[in-house]
């Protein structure tokens, strides 16, 4: 029996690299449909790219259909090899950048969902400064829940995250930035709204919306274990909607309530007992891709705090 010919006998072409980039995005997104927004391509176009790559490599890279999406064994090998390939490309680009004192490439930022904020927010100022210093770097921003920001950085889906880190990770470098005051709120129409002298024992009679610091093991107070958590919303805007309905109590950032004009609709409860500070930090892996861009953005963040 003759030996099977090599799938890539010659040099990698620009088309090969493009197809591999699409395949990596699909693998990291968990499917073709999930990768549409990230790639800004139609589902059918992505499917054609994957089929072209499979044809060029003479491999079945993934299973896709009614049963869901999954990588084959060969697909996992190609995915890992492509990570090494593009890491080498990024390292090459970084070395060339250093020689020209000019930053190129990409910087993917992941931020807790309400951080980008309005025109005077810290993040807007940092983006303005970074864009002035590195105008050729392509910036991509994702807004996620705090825990999802950490996961994105750990999984190498984001180069730099700004989030509340509730535990330490040996893989991450952490740069503390600023604190955010969190308070327990009730909305207009709730039985406790406008009531003076609310007692801690009364809270157990009402429904709460769960947030990360109300989860088991993360409680801001032992009292939390007695609260009736009937809803769950780890994104601030969704949680605010539930609290504004007048049927739930929950935690929100004081500055967000004020900046969004909710302070006339929401009332803090027992702030001396349940308010606490979240510390926001910039996080990145110890050896990030495009390290110069990551370092520069961290410098911009530090200059703003």
Image (cartoon, rainbow, N blue to C red):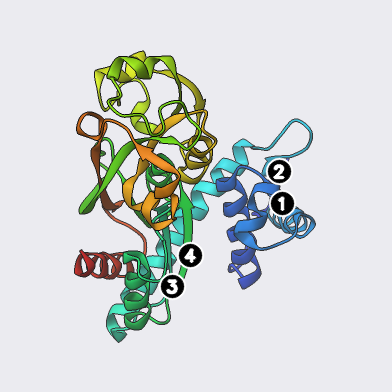
Reading the image, the residue beneath label 1 is: 54
SS at circle 4? strand
Q: Residues within 10 Å of mark 1 (few under 14, many from 20)?
A: some
Q: Residue furthest bottom?
A: 100
* Tag nearer the camera, 4 or 3: 4
User: What residue is at 42 percent from the left and 75 percent from the top?
Assistant: 137
* Mark 4–mark 3 distance (CA, rounded to whole Å): 11 Å
Within-10-Å neighbours for mark 2: few <14, some 14–19, many 20+: some
First in sequence: mark 2 vs mark 3:
2
User: Which quadrant is the N terminus positioned in?
Assistant: top right
**Which residue is disc 4 drawn over?**
140
What secondary structure is found at the residue carrying circle 1? helix
Q: CA distance from mark 2 to mark 1?
A: 6 Å
Name above or below for residue 215 compared with residue 119.
above
**Is residue 113 among what the camera can see?**
no
- Residue beneath the point at 75% across and 30% down: 67
Judging by the rendered image, the residue that carries numbered circle 2 is 60
Callout 4–callout 3 Cβ contact below 8 Å: no
Q: Is residue 293 above or below residue 257?
A: below
The residue that disc 3 covers is 105
From mark 4 to mark 2, how far is it between C-alphas?
A: 31 Å
- Contact between marks 4 and 1 (CB within 8 A): the answer is no
Q: Indicate which label's residue lies in the foreground, 2 or 3.
A: 3
**Circle 2 sits in a helix, a strand or a loop, which is it?**
loop
């Amino acid at each position: 029996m003759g030996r099977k010919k090599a799938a890539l006998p010659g040099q990698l072409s620009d088309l090969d690299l493009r197809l591999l980039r699409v395949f990596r995005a699909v693998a990291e997104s968990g499917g073709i449909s999930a990768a549409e927004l990230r790639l800004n391509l139609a589902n059918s176009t992505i499917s054609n790219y994957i089929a072209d790559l499979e044809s060029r490599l003479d491999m079945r890279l993934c299973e896709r259909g009614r049963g869901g999406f999954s990588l084959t064994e060969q697909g996992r090998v190609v995915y890992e090899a492509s990570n090494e390939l593009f890491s080498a490309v990024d390292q090459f680009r970084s070395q060339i950048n250093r020689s020209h004192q000019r930053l190129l490439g990409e910087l993917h930022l992941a931020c807790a969902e309400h951080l980008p904020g309005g025109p005077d927010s810290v993040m807007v100022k940092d983006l303005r400064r970074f864009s002035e210093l590195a105008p050729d770097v392509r910036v991509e921003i994702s807004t996620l829940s705090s825990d999802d920001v950490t996961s994105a950085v750990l999984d190498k889906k984001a180069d730099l995250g700004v989030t509340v880190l509730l535990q330490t990770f040996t893989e991450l470098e952490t740069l503390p930035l600023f604190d955010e005051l969190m308070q327990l709120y009730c909305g207009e129409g709730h039985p406790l709204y406008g009531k003076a002298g609310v007692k801690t024992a009364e809270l157990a009679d009402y429904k709460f919306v769960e947030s990360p610091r109300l989860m088991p093991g993360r409680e801001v107070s032992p009292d939390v274990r007695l609260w009736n958590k009937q809803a769950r919303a780890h994104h601030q805007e969704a949680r605010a909607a539930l609290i504004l309905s007048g049927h739930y109590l929950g935690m929100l950032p004081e500055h967000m309530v004020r900046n969004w004009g909710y302070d006339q609709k929401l009332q803090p409860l027992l702030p001396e007992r349940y308010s606490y500070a979240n510390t926001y930090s910039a996080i990145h892996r110890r050896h990030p891709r495009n390290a110069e861009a990551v370092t520069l953005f961290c410098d911009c963040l530090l200059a703003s705090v």
